[in-house]
């Protein structure tokens, strides 16, 4: 079995970026959402993005962002993919893809089997689907909350597009998640942090080692 690809999301500083890249991450994610402790200014994101080596995908996470916000990011930050993590419609996904000519990953929150119907709706327009846990009631963030969903809901699912498992993943449970779901890609943020927005190089390395060895 091919080792899963890993996305380290919410990179905020050079040390975290270096840890992710050296450990073998296939994607690094930069968050543009003011309510998040991982939020970056465009200037900070650009400074990090230009240091990402070829072969590692640079992903911009946005939440219900309008064209003006996306234009500003696109103009300054060298990106490889958008991650739409809000309530964007399939039509909006298609608009973003057409406007910027970049692949788009759409996050879909899952709490029960009925929520998986949204995956099929978005798969027709998005290049990838991020299957994430629905945020707890009252949460300020659409993701990065450190909560998981019942992984049995997506056990060895086969969709037409690549998909990525997210939500509550840690170095301790990542291998179990892969074994149970058959996910070929994993996304982690809070699970490799010492504090909100502060990545742990040790935990990043441990996460990659748990699923890639």
Image (cartoon, grey):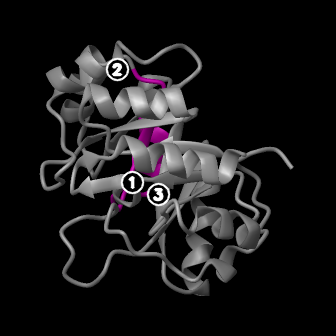
Q: Nearer the viewer, mark 1 or mark 3?
A: 1
Q: How far apart are labels 3 and 2 at the CA level?
A: 22 Å
Q: Nearer the viewer, mark 3 or mark 2?
A: 2
Whole-percent x, y for residue 145 in the image: 31, 68
Provide the residue designation for mark 1.
Answer: 192
Label 1: how many residues lie within 10 Å, few (<14), some (14-19) or many (20+)?
many
- Asked whether 101 or 39 is in front, the reply is 39
Q: Tell me where the magenta segment starts and ends, as one range.
A: 79-96
- The answer to which quarter of the image holds residue 100 is top left
Magenta-span inclusion, residue 46? no
Q: Which mark is residue 107?
A: 3
Magenta-span inclusion, residue 95? yes
Residue drawn at (24%, 36%), measured in percent from left and top?
Answer: 12
Q: Nearer the viewer, mark 2 or mark 1?
A: 1
Which tag, 1 or 3, sits closer to the chain's start?
3
- The answer to which quarter of the image holds residue 129 is bottom right
- Asked whether 68 or 174 is in front, the reply is 174
Placement of 135 over or under 30, stated as above or below? below
Across the whole image, how many numbered discs are drawn on residues?
Answer: 3
Provide the residue designation for mark 2.
Answer: 49
Tell me the SS state at disc 3.
strand
Q: How far apart are labels 2 and 1 at the CA level?
A: 20 Å
- Report if the CB atoms under discs 1 and 3 are less than 8 Å apart: no
Compared across the picture, whether 86 is left or right of 90 comes to: left
Residue drawn at (33%, 75%), measured in percent from left and top?
Answer: 135
Tell me the SS state at disc 2.
helix
Placement of 15 over or under 7, stated as above or below? above
Whole-percent x, y for residue 44 in the image: 18, 24
- Asked whether 196 or 49 is in front, the reply is 196
Asked whether the viewer can see residue 186, the reply is yes
Whole-percent x, y for residue 82 in the image: 43, 37
Which tag, 2 or 1, sits closer to the chain's start?
2
């Amino acid at each position: 079995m091919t080792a899963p690809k890993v996305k380290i999301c919410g990179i905020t500083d050079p040390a975290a970026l270096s840890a992710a890249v050296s450990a073998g991450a296939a994607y690094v994610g930069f968050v543009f959402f003011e309510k998040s402790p991982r939020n970056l200014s465009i200037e900070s994101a650009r400074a990090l993005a230009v240091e990402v080596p070829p072969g590692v995908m640079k992903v911009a996470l946005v939440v219900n962002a309008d064209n003006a916000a996306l234009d500003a990011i696109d103009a300054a930050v060298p990106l490889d993919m958008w991650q739409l993590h809000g309530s964007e419609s399939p039509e909006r996904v298609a608009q973003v893809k057409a406007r910027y000519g970049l692949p788009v990953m759409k996050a879909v929150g899952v709490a029960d089997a009925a929520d998986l119907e949204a995956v099929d709706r978005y798969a027709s327009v998005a290049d990838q689907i991020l299957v994430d846990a629905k945020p707890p009631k009252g949460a300020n963030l659409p993701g990065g909350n450190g909560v998981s969903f019942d992984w049995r809901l997506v056990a060895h699912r086969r969709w037409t597009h690549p998909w990525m498992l997210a939500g509550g993943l840690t170095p301790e449970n990542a291998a179990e998640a892969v074994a149970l779901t058959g996910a070929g890609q994993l996304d982690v943020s809070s699970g490799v942090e010492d504090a909100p927005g502060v990545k742990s190089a040790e935990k990043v390395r441990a996460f990659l080692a748990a699923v890639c060895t």
